[in-house]
Image (cartoon, helix red, strand yellow):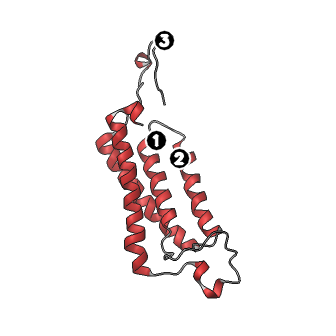
Amino acid sequence: MPLNFGKKGWFWCLAFLISFGLSDSISADVIKPFFHRARPCNTLSLSNVIHLIVPCGSGYSFPSSHAANHFCLAFFAAVSLKPLFKWIWWVALPWAILVSYAQVYVGVHFPLDVTCGALLGIAIGTCTGILFKRYFNLQPPFQNQEDLPLPGKSFTGL
């Protein structure tokens, strides 16, 4: 991003990290301690049903921070970069869905944990993406045919 967009590209990277930080801190430091929901792998009544693939972890389960963080980053990137990359939704959304599904599959989160984490991430990523576009809208470097670089000039294109 900084290579193609200079200062605005650095601001995009910073906003990406801020979005991640907001999502992670709200899910892990604000919501999880409030609900104190045990993970499915730490629930005795489910021990015969769950086939644990990864270490369970000792933290709380609700909401899934993985789902919140990945959906936040996916939606931030998709909202802020859609004018530049028309395909971004086709990559960002399946990526977040697969990461979230994996949390349920390996037995460390209930489906509701992942769903609520995803909703939290969508809200934060969309809001930060809209704010970024409002103040630092990235524009494609070549809007018209006349703006294309001359033959022989290098461009680090998108």
Which sits in the foreground, 158 or 7? 7
* Residue type highlighted by circle 2: Trp
Circles 1 and 2 in contact, beta carbons < 8 Å: yes
Label of residue 5 in the image:
none
Q: Residue at x 41, y 44 (%)?
A: 80
Disc 3 residue crowd, few under 14, some 14–19, many 20+, Cα 10 Å: few
Left or right side of 93 for 10: left
- On the image, the x and y values in percent for residue 25 come to 38, 65
C-alpha gap between disc 1 and disc 2: 8 Å
As drawn, the residue found furthest toward the top would be 151
Q: Amino acid at mark 1?
A: Lys
Which mark sits nearer the N-terminus, 1 or 3?
1
Tag on residue 82?
1
* Viewer-side residue, 91 vs 59: 59
Among the two numbered marks 1 and 2 on one chain, the one whose residue lies closer to the N terminus? 1
Q: CA distance from mark 3 to mark 2?
A: 33 Å
| Disc 1 from disc 3: Cα separation | 29 Å
Residue denoted by label 2: 89
Q: Secondary structure at mark 3?
A: loop
Which residue carries the number 3 mark? 152
Res 28 → quadrant: bottom left
Q: Secondary structure at mark 2?
A: helix
* Residue located farthest toward the bottom when viewing the structure as drawn: 45
Quadrant where the image shows the N terminus: top left
